[in-house]
Image (cartoon, rainbow, N blue to C red):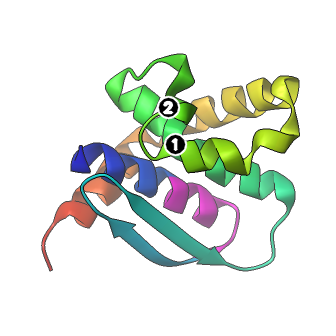
Amino acid sequence: MKQATAIHEAAHALMAMQCGLEVTEIKVETHTGSCSYKGAHTIFDDWRITLAGPVAERFFYGTPHDCLTQHGGTGDLNSIADIGFANLITFEQSVTAWVEHYAPDIERLAATLLTPN
């Protein structure tokens, strides 16, 4: 479970960096995690960053389509509930393509997050 959390948070962090934001902290616990970032960004950046975590979990672990409602993704789903289903599907497809492209980077960052200091 901690590996899945690391993958989830690594995807949030890498997407935030891709959006030009500074990642200030990443925390990984057994069943929860967080990724903090700062910088000027749009609501569309927030949606991409939010979707990156659960979409990465599905990519790496084959989590079902409703992965946004499982594990740590519950908070992610609540964060994007206002965008509407059609927009969610479009953004999810975009983020899925991004996760597929950056999968090796997500794995590397996740491994780093799991390495004891």
Label 1 Cα crowd, 10 Å radius (few <14 / some 14-19 / many 20+): many
The quadrant holding residue 104 is top left
Helix, strand or loop at mark 1:
helix
Magenta segment includes 32: no
**Which residue: 59% across, 55% down?**
15
Q: Residue at x 52, y 42 (%)?
A: 73
In the image, 83 versus 106, the foreground residue is 83
Instruction: Residue at the far left: name it.
Output: 116
Residue that mark 2 sits on: 100
Quadrant the N terminus occupies: top left
Circle 2: element type: helix
Amino acid on which the number 2 mark rests in the picture: Glu
Specify the quadrant of the image occupied by residue 41.
bottom right
Q: Amino acid at mark 1?
A: Gly
Stretch of the chain drawn in magenta: 12-22
The residue under label 1 is 73
